[in-house]
Image: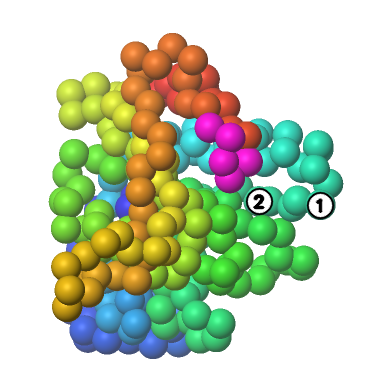
Amino acid sequence: MSGPHIERPDLPEYMSWEELERLPEEIADQIELWNGRVVWMRRGSGEHQMFIRRLTNALEQSTRKDMSTRPDHCWVANFETNIFFGATGKSDFATPDFLVHRCLGGPYRDIRSSDVLLVGEVLSPSNTPVDVEAKKGRYADAGIPWYWEVHLERDDSAIDMVRALALETRPGQLPDGVRPLHRANYLAVGEWTRADTGGIAIDHPFPIHIPWSELEF
């Protein structure tokens, strides 16, 4: 959810990946395909871009530390990279602000949702709850184990709150005849603000400790 504003061309409601690739890069980079449906992504401010980079760098430090003590693990921290849903095809994908995925065993390989351990979105005050929930639901339906929300201050160039959510695949007890809208959902398991002087600290999906000083604008 980032990047400069551009004039949106008149596009069909549905496109294939191959058709998307034929668009100018500055147009294609602002589109996700949700089962082939064209979805324009809201673009953010300079603060938005800065916090994406800060968070990616901090997560990379944590992944490297984890791999140094557990060599059987191999993680990559990345940002604004397409995640393709399903085992094949490329016309159903989302582009999180930051993510951690397993090492892919070679260069220039597509990232599938089954490769992804954690996704995160930096949410500006202009992001609507409907848009946020729709994208979060796609990550949950794809079985991505961890989702982070990073909320920015409305009147300051700073992070207001970071929330970590874990995937819950067993629906709670519901009345007879009622079925959940999604087969999985995220539950909040950690929440931090700048009042937490110890910074962000959580042991899952691997030990993560991020001092607030590393996330300053």
Q: CA distance from mark 2 to mark 1?
A: 14 Å
Amino acid at circle 1: Asp
Callouts 2 and 1 close, C-beta under 8 Å: no
Q: Which residue is mark 1?
A: 72
Residue 88 covered by magenta stretch? no
Q: Which residue does the image show at 55% across and 85% down from the upper left?
A: 88
Residue 208 higher or lower than 44, as above or below: above
Q: In which quadrant is the C terminus drawn?
A: top left
Query: Which residue is nearer to you in this view: 196 or 97?
Result: 196
Q: Which residues are magenta?
A: 202-206
- Residue under circle 2? 76
Image location of residue 169, percent across then percent down: 42, 64
Tell me the residue at 47%/20% (across/down): 199
Q: Nearer the viewer, mark 2 or mark 1?
A: 1
- Per the image, label 2 sits on a secondary structure element best described as strand
Q: Amino acid at mark 2?
A: Val
